[in-house]
Amino acid sequence: MNTLHRKLLRELWQLKGQMASIALVVATGIMTVLTMRGSYDTLVQAQQSYYAQTRFADAWAPLKRAPNSLRERIQAIPGVANVDTRVSFLATLDLPGLDAPAQARLVSLPEQRRPEINDIRIRSGRYLAPGAASEVLISSKFADARALKPGDTLRAIINGRARTLDIVGIAISPEHTYAVPPGALYPDDKRYGVLWMGRKVLGPAYDMDGAFNEAVLTLSPDANPQAVLSRIDTLLDPYGGLGAYLRKDQASHLILQGELDSNKVMGTVVPAVFLGVAAFLLNLVLTRLIATQRGEIAVLKAFGYRSREVAIHYLLFAMAAVAFGAAIGAVAGTLLGSAYVNLYGAYFDFPQLDYQLSPLLLAIATAITVVAAAAGALLAVRRAALLPPAEAMRPEPPASFKPGWLERSGLTRPLPSSARMVLRNVQRKPLQALLSSLGVSFSVAILIIGLAMFDGVQWMMDLQFRVIQREDLSVSFDEPRTVAVTYDFYNLPGVTRVEAYRLAPARLRSGHFEKEIAIQGLAPDGRLRRIVSASGGEQPLPAEGLVLSAILARQLHLAVGDQVDVAFLEGQRRRMQLPVAGIVDDLLGVSATMNRDALQRAIGGPVMVSGAYLSVAADALPQLERTLKAAPAVAGVASPSTMLASFEKQMDDSLFIAVGFLLGFACVIAVAVIYNGARISLSERGRELASLRVMGFRRSEAAMLLLGEQALITLMAIPIGWLLGYGLSYAVVAALQTDTYRIPLVVHAPTYLLAAAIVVAAAVASGALVRRRINRLDLIAVLKTRE
């Protein structure tokens, strides 16, 4: 080991506190990348592998009823690689211990072979036996939530008849990776599941013997998807086709892809911010740290060491901190990434979901920090190494002590001398003070990003489940019913208000843009369900025309006053032009709403409703749910409070934990930056402080000069951090917009104050550590001059 290496080890030990804090900054940046970006890569790989292994469909074509012979004609459409037909229905489940009716999606399976498209994976039990009339496979999440296992039974209402089903297996399917009830955005595993039955059993049960009501297909690589869908719609139109759609619009895939897109943003933008901040801070700290060793560099050169050797020595000094931080970041990032991926496994059914550390990702993250550290180190070393040894060994010439503009203005005259000294020192090195403030301000900004997510989600939940959805229960029918059915609700105990609604599937077209969606018709005088924008303002329900979600209007390139081509996919299947009467910037899902009476006129035929919103006395809710459970026409009962609980649980388990990571990382960066800044300032001004002590200044007065400067830098950083945080939050929120939910940019005043308080607390803690070093300052050693 040569002399420089021994010097390196000795100084690393002497500066272990600062090196540890720099390593933590590096570790935080790398950990963020591996946790968030690594989990995204893992999820995408699991999704693609799952889809490929199960031959996940590229398109779906639901319809009323068609003979099996139609399958050959679908197969003959150019661009269709393979097609499979099946029977699929919603059924009501009678579950013990549950007052409200539960729902299940029943899907047929071939009995002699496995599905050619959308195959299932059996987790326990076995596949269906051919001809077994009561055997059923159930979805994994539903089984877990209801503690069901092979050998248990289920009671279901299938086509109006109660049947007892024997569970023979637990399975998962790629089209139900994220199983949500119809029309919902969040799972309700205790009240919704997927059941698979034999085709020869389920078909006759629904009067589908020799027929099907859904086709699934894969496309050839050279297919034109829209052209294929158009040909399928034309072919299925006489059979009650409800509009074919691609995988991107399939409910489970849509939500999963939305979550992946959000994760990609969080896993790319946020780590990029962290890594960029870490690189900036690393550069800043190392530049100042090595600049304090100007004398040592000159001595090395005077003893004959060449500039290249000195540069490598200090480069190793920086790389030691980076290597230590990279090792911590790799281990911690892998552990946190595994935990983060496991959270997704609680909501998304994948056959296998194991976090894999990507060497490429680790190499890229480490390379960025290495470049930043090397730049900081070499910049400082180069400046000192270019000086002749004799000149470099002399202390730096004192800076100009002439009064600055602040002192000349007279504003500092009433201040005590110590405060004027702090202000003068900051004013004498404005660039250094600005960069230090900028470093601290990034900590404030990162805290603002994390806390703003809490504010936005809380705002979204309050708006959706307390302002928009004001009903106590939402009842949906198994099929559209005459409006007279809703009058029966008034006879039920506890019901104080009933507002019927209508859902009509339709295809909206504007130029070459089109979107299939269920248009919702609300009561003209409705009070239980309203149209409310993200800002909380109510959008009046127009007498005619559609009110579209802002995101849907953007997809169709529509504005208020435009005409949109609407083709209804049920009833008389009318097609007409409807005006866009309003656009609302809502937060959940994608919607098209209109006056219920106007919608009924557009559809034609008798007045029908799809369900009703009920206002119910609180003490009558349990009894009412039991009553609705026995009603044959009721397909589902939902309550906003239940949905809110499900939503909050998911947010608690995913977004809030991710935000918790961000807050923890931000605190580490805040402490590291402030502590390093104070320690380097102590190194730079140790002689000055010792001189003041010898002149009679007390320890507290000497400490005040140094810590006052750090306090001023921290205070300057807070408003800068607020502005940076707001801007970065805007970018993150804008990038997080998906079809399933949009988090609004809401930053409450307490968020700014809390972010500032955390940074101030970090500054106080760092100041206390530095104060101990000032108290133990060896005055004689410090005052020894090098001349």
Image (tube, rainbow, N blue to C red):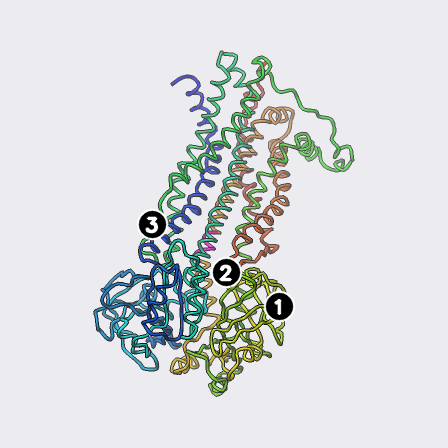
Q: Which residue is mark 2?
A: 739
Mark 1 packing: few (<14 Cα in 10 Å), some, or many (20+)?
A: many
Residue occupying the point 62% across, 44% down:
718
Instruction: Looking at the image, tell me whether mark 3 or mark 1 is earlier in sequence order.
Output: 3
Quarter of the view holding residue 404: top right
Of mark 2 and mark 1, the one earlier in the sequence is 1
Please report contact status of discs 2 and 1: CB closer than 8 Å, yes or no: no
Residue at (60%, 65%) from the top-left corner? 584
Task: Determine the CA span between mark 3 and mark 2.
Answer: 27 Å
Query: Could you tell me if residue 538 is visible in this image?
Result: no
Type of amino acid at the residue the image marks with label 2: Asp
CA distance separating discs 2 and 1: 19 Å
Left or right? Give the position of 699 relative to 201. right
Foreground residue among 117 and 327:
117
Residue 1 lies, with reference to residue 607, above or below; the image says above
Residue ID for mark 1: 582
Check disc 1 and report its element: helix, strand or loop.
strand
The answer to whether residue 186 is seen in the rendering is yes
Magenta residues, start to end: 654-658
Q: Secondary structure at mark 3?
A: loop
Q: Which mark is residue 268?
A: none
Q: How many discs mark residues in the rendered view? A: 3
- Give SS at disc 2: loop
- 504 part of magenta stretch: no
Q: Amino acid at mark 1?
A: Gly
Q: Looking at the picture, does residue 779 appear above or below residue 23?
A: above
Q: Residue 354 shows which numbered tag?
A: 3
**Residue 84, percent across and down?**
32, 65
Q: Earlier in the sequence, mark 3 or mark 2?
A: 3
